[in-house]
Amino acid sequence: MDLASTEKSFVVMVAAATFVAFWATWLAITWEPPIEARLRALRTRRMKTRSEQGAAATRAASTKETSLGLMRQIADRLNLLRGSAADQTTRKLRRAGFLSRDASVVYVFIKLALPLALGFLMILLTSSGLLGVSEDMSLVVCIGAVLSGFIMPEVYLKNVTSRRREVLNYVLPEGLDLLTICVEAGLSIDAAFRRVSREMQSSMPELAAEFELTAIELTYLPDRQQALENMAERSDSPAVAALVNALRQTEKYGTPLANSLRILSQEFRQTRASKAEEKGARMPALMTVPLMVFILPTLITVLIAPAIMSMVALT
């Protein structure tokens, strides 16, 4: 091997060694533990997800605000949100559990648009012949659709209100038990409402929402009696009204609150058990008509049919 080839080999080895040295130095400077790299990747992914969710929420909020603005503009032009009728509508919606300030706007818009939409849809269906209704009955069907559009929101609101009232009456004894525990532990009534609402968020959401709103009103309203009156008005329940009266007497006369809550809980639980027993006692009377109409004719047919067939065969 000559001197030139030796020098070339030496240069290549030096260059390779220099490259390896620089690469090792770079890795030593930029190296981080695997767990830190994983955490950084998770933070990056989380920030990206939050930004995407924020953008989606912003788009949804803008769309919602646009639609609500259109509904509110139509309702204001037609003067549907003024006067005693609007206050009564808001009161009905609160009793049904719709506590948003835009609930009355949406309800009034649906009550206005649903008859028109159903009437227009029925006109299209009857004119195209898809329903198979004669020309004499098409006008009656269209008028019936429009009247149904007027009635359906009211019926739906009444059903939701009655269901919410029944749920509140059913779960109130358990809520009063938790309130009694919190009061006996030394919490004030608004703090007890807030704690019980947090504990019942998943199991009893209706009562939890009612207690949470009552706790907020007890904290921020200047008149605590007004907050209790609002709870009784929103619930539209005799049991909640009895609870409000007990709380008023406790604040007015200084009677022990835990004893009053315990007595109310026992009374409501007994009332719930008596209603269940009443429904159970009504079952035989309710089952009489289906038994006579559906079961007895079938049983009689099964019993008499062989004898009739034998008599027919003999003749």
Image (cartoon, rainbow, N blue to C red):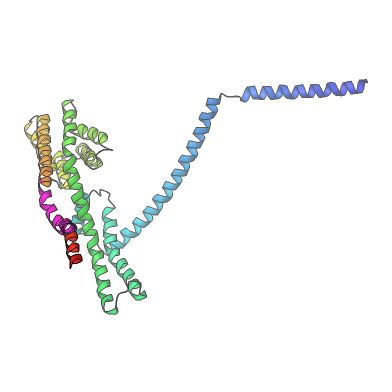
The quadrant of the picture occupied by the C terminus is: bottom left
Residue drawn at 10 percent across, 34 percent down: 266
Q: Is residue 226 above or below residue 27?
A: below
Outermost residue, left side: 253
Where is residue 156, by image quadrant?
bottom left
- Where residue 249 appears, x then y in whole percent? 8, 36
Can you say whether 185 is above or below 166 in the image?
Answer: above
Q: Is residue 311 left or right of residue 79?
A: left
Q: Residue 269, image x and y in percent?
A: 12, 37
- Image quadrant occupied by the N terminus: top right
* Main SS of residues in magenta: helix
Residue lying at the far bottom in this picture: please name it.
136
Left or right: 296 in relation to 17: left
Whether residue 279 is visible: yes
User: x, y percentage for residue 142?
Assistant: 27, 72
Instruction: Please indicate, yes or no, whether residue 244 appears anywhere in the rendered image.
Output: no
Q: Residue at x 66, y 25 (%)?
A: 26
Q: Which residues are magenta?
A: 281-303
Residue found 52% across the figure and 30% down from its top: 40
